[in-house]
Image (tube, coloured by chain):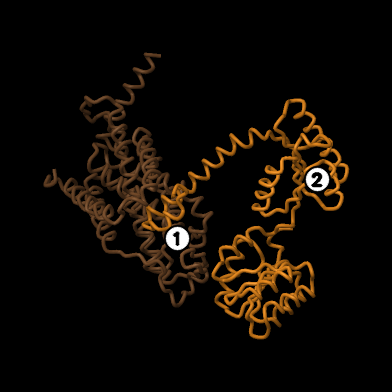
Chain colours: A orange, B brown
């Protein structure tokens, strides 16, 4: 599923805000549907598959929380966000009870960060490593890229996770407490021959590399990944950002240049 | 090996001597021109140029002006290089900065592609015309270009002195052409914590001015940020940050077209281009780090004064008056 196929329903009676929100979400690659009141929103939700609904709390004909409940009744899988300029603790608690994300309009930064993580459940990436810290950091990075991480710290956990859920990509550490990474890769391929697998190891050698290739799995050495490419990637990104800051400064926009500059303290 | 070094030094010295005196478009007559041998080693001018461009890079960032607009008048005024070489390298300098900044600006949604592409089509077409016209005039008499450059630089000085860009210009009604071309968008203003919608107006006068801007960019190798930003911001009503980001991105297209003409005519000499580009890029990287501690307003006024002087000096040189030395 691609972003273009995902409908995001936007409900707000402030047409200017609605238009600007829709434009920005479209720029992120999603398809948007808009409604200025609750009834229109329900009609749209009845005739379209909605992936995410972003709803203002104050609507002319209903309250945002009630509309969330109505939309969830139509399709329990719809993800919902309540956006309000007049929030309070009660509304926030009600949103939580409805499994709905809650953002205030004066903190749109948090909202955009939340949206950046979508679509989070379209591609499942199974991460298998007994190093908890490494697993957590990988999961955060995978989530930031917009994918859903599925975590396992042993081979058995990984196989059982793959048996219960469609896994698209599996990143497996070679040394696991109960079995070797190659065995896990082999079992995952038995469960689903289309699964893409990557073997990640800090103790690699040529034999292991060959065995990995035989299983049609990718192979990466942790040491290489963390040091060399990390350094190159960071240096390039930093240069690109600094030059963007230089570009803004050349045009006389010193404020934005200073905001962008990665070297600012 | 020693023999190779000697040959290379001789070649480099010959190139430096020739490029100080001979226009590339007169290359066929080069053999007939008596060239006084330079007494300095070949690497002196590239080294001076590297240091000079490094300082220029720092100052350009702090003053809020492009590298190209400072490079061409100052290097043509104070270095013994033919103006055609300086203009060719000026374009490469502006182009290098724009190409390096482009991806970061696009990623941050600061450069607007829909706004940039139609404008770039016009500006780059006329940048080619400008480059050809500039080289033709230089072929007739380099002093014509020198005087025109001086007039332009003085004009830029006035523009930088008097134009006050607006952060968020008010556009009450988007015109039909702007609407059809999709000259609108929105961005997140972190300071005001709001989404800012923007649109443009006065599209026809704006696009017509880009004909002139393209011509000037191609003719003098100045880059064109100094003109792009006021037209996009003050005339067409794009917000300051969008105007600046789009202008920089625009340069990467406009200057590429003109740069081909100069490259094709042999006006881009690596011995000038490499130290200039490296110096300016390194200077820019240092300059941006100094933004927080420097006083950009003061530096900008100083740079405007230098531009006035360089402009007047170019006119003086072109007219052969000798009033400014």
Q: CA distance from mark 1 to mark 2?
A: 47 Å
Q: Are marks 1 and 2 in contact (CB under 8 Å)?
A: no
Residue to which mark 2 is pinned: A195
Asked if A213 appears above or below B105 in the picture, the reply is: above
Q: Which mark is residue B119?
A: 1
- The residue sitting at 36% across, 51% down in the picture is B291
Which one is in front, B251 or A106? A106
Label 2 crowd bin: few (<14), some (14–19), many (20+), radius 10 Å: some
- Picture coordinates of residue A213, whole percent (x, y): 77, 32
Can residue A200 be seen at all in this image of the molecule?
Answer: yes
- Answer with left or right where residue B112 lies relative to residue A212: left
Instruction: State the residue at coordinates (39%, 55%).
Output: B126
Give SS at disc 2.
loop
Mark 1, Cα crowd under 10 Å, few <14 / some 14-19 / many 20+, is many
Between residues B13 and B40, which one lies in front from this camera angle? B40
| Mark 1 and mark 2 on one chain | no
């Amino acid at each position: 599923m691609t972003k273009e196929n995902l409908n995001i329903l936007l409900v707000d009676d402030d047409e200017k805000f609605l238009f600007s929100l829709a434009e920005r979400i479209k720029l992120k690659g999603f398809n948007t549907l808009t409604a200025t009141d609750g009834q229109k929103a329900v009609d749209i939700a009845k005739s379209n598959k909605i992936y995410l609904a972003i709803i203002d709390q104050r609507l002319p004909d209903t309250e945002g929380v009630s509309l969330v409940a109505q939309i969830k009744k139509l399709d329990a899988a719809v993800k919902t966000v309540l956006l309000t300029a007049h929030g309070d603790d009660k509304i926030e608690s009600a949103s939580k009870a409805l499994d709905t994300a809650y953002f205030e309009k004066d903190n749109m930064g948090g909202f955009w960060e939340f949206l950046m993580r979508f679509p989070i459940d379209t591609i499942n990436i199974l991460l298998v490593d007994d190093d908890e810290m490494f697993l957590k950091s990988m999961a955060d990075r995978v989530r930031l890229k917009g994918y859903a991480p599925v975590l396992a710290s042993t081979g058995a956990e990984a196989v059982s996770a793959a048996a219960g859920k469609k896994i698209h990509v599996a990143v497996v550490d070679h040394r696991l407490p109960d079995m070797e990474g190659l065995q896990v890769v082999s079992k995952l391929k038995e469960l689903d021959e289309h699964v893409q697998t990557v073997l990640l190891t800090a103790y690699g050698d040529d034999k292991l590399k060959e065995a990995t290739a035989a299983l049609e799995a990718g192979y990466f050495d942790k040491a290489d990944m963390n040091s060399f490419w990390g350094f190159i990637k960071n240096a390039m990104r930093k240069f690109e950002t600094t030059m963007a800051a230089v570009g803004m400064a050349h045009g006389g926009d010193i404020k934005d240049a200073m905001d962008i500059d990665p070297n600012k303290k | 090996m020693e023999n190779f070094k000697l040959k290379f030094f001789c070649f480099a010295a010959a190139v430096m001597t020739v490029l100080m005196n001979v226009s590339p478009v007169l290359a066929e007559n080069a053999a007939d021109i008596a060239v006084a041998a330079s007494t300095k080693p070949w690497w002196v001018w590239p080294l001076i140029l590297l240091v000079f461009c490094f300082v220029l890079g720092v100052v350009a960032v702090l003053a809020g002006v492009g590298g190209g607009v400072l490079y061409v008048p100052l290097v043509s005024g104070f270095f013994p290089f033919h103006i055609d070489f300086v203009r060719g390298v000026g374009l490469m300098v502006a182009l290098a900065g724009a190409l390096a900044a482009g991806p970061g600006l696009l990623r941050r949604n600061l450069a607007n592609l829909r706004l940039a592409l139609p404008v770039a089509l016009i500006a780059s077409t006329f940048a080619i015309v400008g480059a050809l016209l500039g080289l033709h005039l230089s072929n007739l008499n380099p002093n014509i270009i020198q005087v025109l450059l001086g007039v332009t630089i003085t004009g830029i000085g006035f523009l930088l002195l008097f134009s006050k860009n607006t952060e968020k210009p008010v556009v009450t009604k988007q015109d039909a052409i702007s609407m059809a071309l999709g000259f609108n968008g929105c961005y997140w203003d972190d300071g005001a914590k709001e989404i800012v919608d923007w649109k443009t107006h006065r599209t026809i006068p704006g696009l017509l001015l880009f004909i002139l801007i393209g011509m000037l960019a191609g003719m003098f190798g100045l880059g064109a940020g100094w003109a792009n930003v006021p037209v996009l911001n003050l005339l067409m009503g794009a917000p300051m940050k969008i105007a600046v980001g789009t202008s920089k991105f625009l340069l990467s297209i406009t200057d590429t077209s003109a740069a081909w003409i100069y490259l094709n005519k042999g006006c881009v000499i690596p011995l000038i281009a490499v130290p200039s580009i490296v110096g300016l890029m390194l200077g820019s990287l240092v300059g941006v780090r100094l933004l927080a501690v420097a006083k950009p307003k003061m530096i900008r006024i100083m740079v405007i004064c230098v531009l006035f002087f360089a402009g007047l000096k170019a006119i003086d040189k072109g007219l052969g008056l000798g009033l400014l030395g």
